[in-house]
Image (cartoon, rainbow, N blue to C red):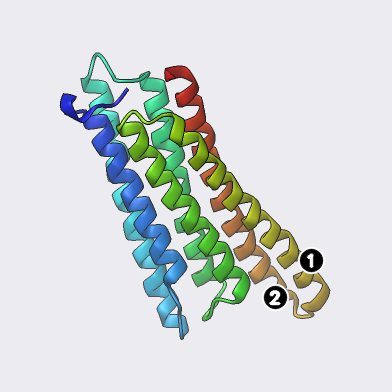
Amino acid sequence: MFGRNKKDQFGEILNEMTANLSEAASYFSSFSPEKLEDITVFSETINNYESQGDRLVYKMIVELNDTFITPIEREDLLELTNRIDDVLDSMEKAALSFEICHLSKFNDVITSMAAEISGACESICEAVELMFHKKLKDINALSKKIKAHESACDALYRKALLDLFQDEEDPIRLIRYKTVYENLEEIANFCEDVSKTLNSIVMKNA
């Protein structure tokens, strides 16, 4: 398992990845657009975070190819890397959908779902840091937090769809908001996938 005294480059890359993810999620949840042009800036900023994530994925793959012995199974390192990248990719997709759907303001549902996603990403960042310090037992508690955020996001999503189909009479607006809500729910699902991968690594290395 990871240890700083061994100058473990894999742990450093994972920490960079999750720090980038958490920062992107924090920006995502705190952004409050006032006009349509703001959404373009928002989408471009999230795209920059995603591009940085891609660079770190590439860096991880290079390290895996250049290293004979890894601190944990290389398949697990690659799996965790890809699952973290999935969260950022889905975040970029959601941000782009705001721009495509011409949403100039975020309603309470979007704000609440984004806050849950940000909380999940913070827990992912903390869990990877714990793994880096060999504190495996504490990772399970954070995995439960990630699941709780995903469940809360799922509940918001279900209620939002029920309200949308009951109250919205404009079919174009219905499609726009349905698309956005689905993309936000997808981010939360990918966060849960990260927690499952973390749990699997803990089980193998406990």
Identify the residue shown where x is 57% and y is 72%.
Answer: 101
Question: Can residue 190 be seen here?
Answer: no
Decide which of 73, 133 is in the foreground and name it: 133
Q: Position of residue 52 (x, y in %)?
A: 29, 51
Secondary structure state at the residue bearing disc 2? helix
In the rendered structure, the answer to whether residue 144 lies left or right of residue 85 reads: right
Q: CA distance from mark 2 to mark 1?
A: 16 Å
Under circle 1, the secondary element is helix
Write the residue at 30% across / 42% down.
Answer: 15
- The image quarter containing residue 81 is top left
Judge depth for marks 2 and 1 and give the one in front.
1
| In this view, 150 is above or below 13 | below
Q: Which residue is mark 2?
A: 172
Q: What amino acid type is highlighted by mark number 2?
A: Ile
Depth check: 111 or 36 in front? 111
Residue with the mark numbered 1: 162
Q: Is residue 125 left or right of residue 29?
A: left
